[in-house]
Amino acid sequence: MAIGVSTTATDAVNGEVNGQQKTQTLKHLPSEFYQYFLGVSAKERKPSPIRGLYPLEAKPGVISLLAGKPNDAMFPFESFSFTTAEPSDPSQLIPVSITGSDLASGLQYGATAGLPRLNEWFVGLQERSHGRKNNEGWRLTIGNGSQDVLWKAINTIVNDGDAVLIESPVYAGVLPIFKSLHCEEVEVATDANGVCSSDLRVILENWPAGKPKPKVFYTVPYGCNPTGMTATIERRREVLQLAREHNFLILEDDPYFYLYFGKAERPPSYFKLELEMPEVGRVIRFDSFSKILSAGMRMGFASGPKPILDAMDLHTAAVNLQASSLVQAITLALLEKWGYDGFFAHTQAVASFYREKRDAFEKALQTHLGDLAEWSTPEAGMFFWFKLLMSPDPSEEGDSKELIETKAYEGGVLALPGTVFLPNGRKTAYVRAAFSLSTEEQVNEAMRRLRAVMLKEREGK
C-alpha cells in the first residue's frame, strides 16, 4: 500500500483522454517517508563540519577562512586541451580547451554532489531522456562511476543481514556488496522479457508473516549483464505497482540505457514510468558514462529521492570527499561543446556500433554452435547469454563451469560460466560472452574453437 503520500503539488502531468485535455497533479513522497529506508549507519552519519559549510562561501562579500584548500597559484597547470569528433560527422575533429575559472574548478576541491554546472547538465539530460523535471522531490549526485554511487546507495539503505530482492542471473559486480552486508539474497527469476514480475509477486505475497520484507529490489533493465535481456514495459509497470503494494525501493542500475539497439521503440525507464503512479519517489536510478564516453574516466551519477541522495552524499563526504573535479571539468567541457543534440547523436552512433557487433557475434554463434546452444537475441548492451547443450540427452542440464574455465580456456577461448552470475552459485549450463571488443574474425575463430571443445565433451559422455 502507499505510505506517506505528499499532498503538495510539485508539477502537472498533462495528457488527453477522449480528446479532452487532462491535468493530473503530480505528487511525491515526503521526506519523512524515507526514514524507514535509511540504514542504521546512514542515520548515525553526521555532516562534515567543513563540507557542510561550503555553500556559505558563495555569499558576496564573505571572506572565507573555512577550508584547507590549496592555493591554485601553486598548481602547475595552465590549460588542458583535447580534440573530439563531431557527433554528426565523426570525420570532423573539434578542439576543446579548459582554461580560466573552469580549469580552476577542475583542479580544486568541489561540491560533494559534483560541479554545479555539470550536475545541472545531467539534470537536464534526465528531463530529456526520462521526462523528469527537477521539482519533483528528486536530485542528482555525481560519483566515480555508477558502481561508486550504487555501493553508497546500498550501504545507505541496507542493514547487515537484511533480505534484498535481486533479479537472477544478476550483474556479478553487485554480489560482493550484498555479501559484505551478509544479506539474504532473494532471487527473482528473469527470462527473455526481463524480470519475471509475476514471480516477484508470488515471493512478496507469500512472504513469511512477522519477517521484515525487503526494502530494495535490484535490477539492470536494459541489456542486462549477463543475460542481455531488456524488460518489457508491462513487467516494469507491475514491478512499480508491487513497490507501492509492498513498500520497497527500486535500484535501477542502467549502464546500457544508451546502448539500446532493438527494432522496437526503447521501453521507458522505471524512473520515467513512475510518473504514471499516484506518487513518485520509489526509484533510485544509476547512470554510467563508461560505455559511451570512457570507462577509465569513472563518470557516473545517481538520481533519486532527495533524502536518500542526501544520505549518500554524507557517506561520500566521509569517504572520498567527491568525484574527481578534473574528470568532471573534462566531461563538462565535452558535453557543453556537443550540446544535448550532439550527445544524443553520439549515443545513437554507439548503439549502432554495438548492434553491428551483436549481429556479427550471433552469425558466428549460429554458424558454429547453432546445434549445440540455445539463446535469445539481446536488444541492448554487449553480452550474449547462451545455454550449452552439453549432452546429447536433452534431459541432462549440464554444468558449464569446468568446460568453460578449464577445457575451453585450454582450447583458446576465455569466457565466463553462468554460475558466477547466480547469487546462490548453483550449477548452470549457461555462458556469458562479451561481443564488445572482438573482431568478426576473432568471434568466428572463438566459436569454432568452442565447438571443437563441445564435440569432444559430448564424445566423452
Image (tube, rainbow, N blue to C red):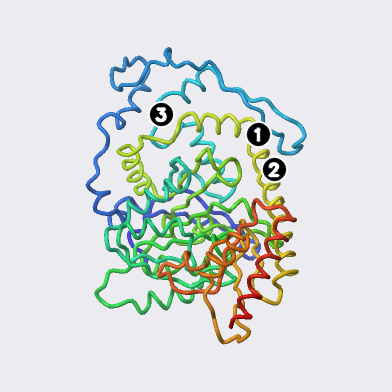
Q: Could you say where residue 288 lies in the image, as x and y percent from the top left?
A: 53, 46
Marks 1 and 2 in Cβ contact (< 8 Å): yes
Question: Residue at left 44%, top 53%?
Answer: 284
Could you tell me which secondary element the residue under label 3 belongs to? loop
Is residue 160 placed above or below 307 in the rendered structure? below
What residue type is disc 1 on? Answer: Trp
- 150 relative to 226 in the view: left or right: left
Between 138 and 392, the residue placed more toward the observer is 392
Which residue position is annotated with label 3? 110
Question: Residue at left 27%, top 63%?
Answer: 161
- 118 relative to 82 in the view: left or right: left
Which residue position is annotated with label 1? 338
Which residue position is annotated with label 2? 345
Is residue 458 placed above or below 85 in the rendered structure? below
Q: Could you say where residue 188 lies in the image, as x and y percent from the top left?
A: 45, 71
Labels 1 and 2: the sequence-earlier one: 1
Marks 1 and 3 in Cβ contact (< 8 Å): no
Quadrant containing the N terminus is bottom left
What residue type is disc 2 on? Answer: Ala
What residue type is disc 3 on? Answer: Gly
Labels 1 and 3: the sequence-earlier one: 3
Labels 2 and 3: the sequence-earlier one: 3
